[in-house]
Amino acid sequence: MKSSVRMFYDETNFADRKPSWMDTEQRVILNVGGIRHETFSHVLKKIPATRLSRLTPQLGNYDPMLNEYFFDRHPGVFSMILNYYRTGKLHYPTNVCGPLFEEELEFWGLDANQVEPCCWMTYTQHRDTQDTLAVIESLDLDGDPPTQEEIAKKFGWEEDYFSGTMSHWQRLKPRVWALFDEPWSSQYARGISFISVVFILASTMSFILKTDPSFQIPDIDVFYSIRLVDGETGFKNYHKTIGTDKPLTSVHPYFFYVDLICNIWFSIELFIRSFFCPSFHKFVRSPLTIIDVVSTGAFFFESLLHAILIQTGSLVTLDFLSMICVLRLFKLTQHFSGLKILIQTFKASAQELILLVFFVLLAIVIFAALVYYAERSQDNKENQFTSIPLGLWWLVR
C-alpha cells in the first residue's frame, strides 16, 4: 500500500516537473553588471526589433561555459527594462538620473516615450533641469575665453574664418561687442561695465532723491504793488514784493543735469551695442534693449515736453514717465552673473512659486471672509470691516 502511494506521489511530481524540463532550452540567463537575471526567450521576443529580442549564441557577449549573456550596463535600470518585457509597462526608477535612464533605453533599443503616465512627470523633470543648467554653465566666468572659431560662428562668419578672408572690420566688431556686452572678457570690459553700473545707480538714486522734500525748492512768486505818490503829477511808486508758495515745489535743477549726463551715456552705449551686435534682430527683441530704449526715450520725451509746456497742469502727468527709469535696474543682470543665475532659478521654480502664491491668496480670501462675517454677526457701530475687500486689505497690510 505504501509503495503504491509513493509511486503515485513520484509520478505526480514527475508530471509537475515535466514542463520545467521542457522550458529549460527556452531559459535565458542575462548577466548585467554582475547581477544575473533569468527569463525565457519568448518573453524577450514580446518587444521586437530590440537588442534582447535578437539574442543568439553567435553574439560576442555570449559565454558558452556559463551559458549566459554578459552586458556591462547599469543593473538597476535593467531590472526595470526586464520588467517591461514581462509586464508591458515601463516605469522610471527614481534612484537614477534621467539622462542615464535615457542612455540605457537607447542601448537596449527601447523608446523613452513608452514610460508609464504615472512616472512621466518625474521622468521629464530632468529635461527642464538640463536647460537651466545649460544656461547657468554659459554664465561660467572661470571658463576659457571663446576661440576665434566660436566667435566667427557667433557672428555668422564661419566661411570667411575657414577660408582666411576675414576683413579688419570682422576682427574689430567682436572686440568692441565684447567690451560692452561681456564684462568678464578683459580688464577694459570690466572698466566699462563698472562705469555702466555707476550710471545706472546714479540714475536710480536721482529718481529716488528728487522726491524727497529736502531736495526740492519752493516756487518763488514775484508780486508787484503800485502806490500813488502824487495824484496831481501822476508819478507812481512801484513796490516789488517777493513771496514763496510752499505747497508748490519743484525739483532741484541739479537733478536734471545728473539725469542728462546719465542718459547721454545710456544713449552712447545703446548706439554702440546696436551697431556692433552679432544679430540686430535678436538685439532689438532683447528685453534689456527694450527697457533701455523705453527708459532713455522717456527721459528725452519728457524733457522736450517740459520745455514746451512750462508750468502747466500736464506736468504732473508727464512726471509719471520718469518712473520708467527704475526698470533700468534690470540691466544689472548684464553685469552680474549671479543675478542671471537667480533669474534662471526663479524660472525653473516658476510652477512651485505660482502654487505657493495660490495657497497664500487662498488663505487671505478665507480669513478675510471669516473676519467680515465674524464682525457682522454682532451689532458693532464701530465695525471697520464693512466688506470683504476691506478684510483683504487688512490682511495684506
Image: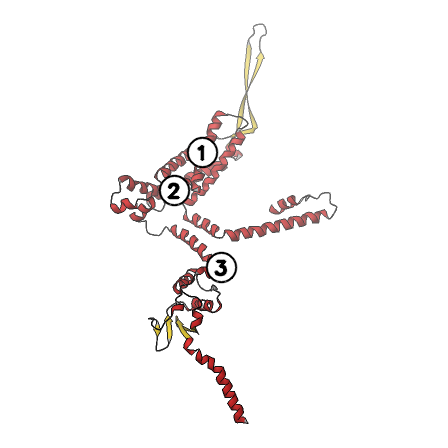
Question: Where is mark 1, residue-wise?
Answer: 297
Percent x, y of residue 374: 70, 49
Distance from label 2 to label 1 (Cα)?
Answer: 23 Å
Percent x, y of residue 181: 37, 43
Q: From the image, which quarter does the N terminus lie in?
A: bottom right
Q: Residue at x 61, y 51 (%)?
A: 363
Question: Where is mark 3, residue-wise?
Answer: 120
Distance from label 1 to label 3 (Cα)?
Answer: 48 Å
Density class for disc 2 (Cα within 10 Å; few <14, some 14-19, many ≥20) is some
Q: From the image, which quarter does the C terminus lie in?
A: top right
Closest to the camera, between mark 1 and mark 3, is: 3
Between 314 and 128, the residue placed more toward the observer is 128
Circle 1 SS class:
helix
User: Measured along the vertical axis of the image, is residue 273 above or below residue 45?
Assistant: above
- Can you tell which quarter of the image residue 280 is in? top left
Of the image marks 2 and 1, the number of the one nearer the N terminus: 2
What amino acid is labelled 2 in the image?
Phe
